[in-house]
Amino acid sequence: GQSGIEICKQLVANPQTQDIPIVFMSAKTQMDEVSEALEEGAKYYITKPYSFSDLVTIIEKFAK
């Protein structure tokens, strides 16, 4: 029952999870929604449909 933004806020506020890189994956493409996710602590926002190679590149970037 929670939005991705709400969950992101909780993860960022918790010392045990605040360092986990959050990547949003959504069909929503409005800039205000993308901006809100990034302002709340998301490291990246990818929109659907996405290419598998793009997703792998993003994951590799944050896995280092």
Image (cartoon, rainbow, N blue to C red):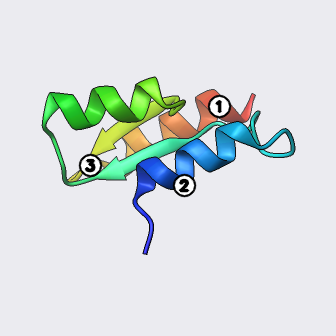
The residue under the point 24% across, 37% down is 33
Q: Position of residue 27 (x, y in %)?
A: 20, 54
* Labels 3 and 1 touching (C-beta < 8 A): no
Mark 1: which amino acid?
A: Phe
> If the image is split into quadrants, where does the N terminus sit?
bottom left
**Which residue bears the numbered disc 1?**
62
The residue under the point 37% across, 51% down is 25
**Which residue bears the numbered disc 3?**
50
Q: Position of residue 46 (x, y in %)?
A: 33, 40
Element on which disc 3 rests: loop
* Labels 1 and 2 touching (C-beta < 8 A): no
Above or below for 36 versus 11: above
Q: Earlier in the sequence, mark 1 or mark 2?
A: 2
Q: Which mark is residue 7?
A: 2
Residue reaching furthest right?
16
**Towards the viewer: 28 or 47:** 28
> Alpha-carbon distance for marks 2 and 3?
22 Å
Q: Position of residue 62 (x, y in %)?
A: 65, 31
The residue under the point 49% across, 31% down is 40
Mark 3: which amino acid?
A: Tyr
Tell me if 52 is positioned left or right of 48 in this view.
right
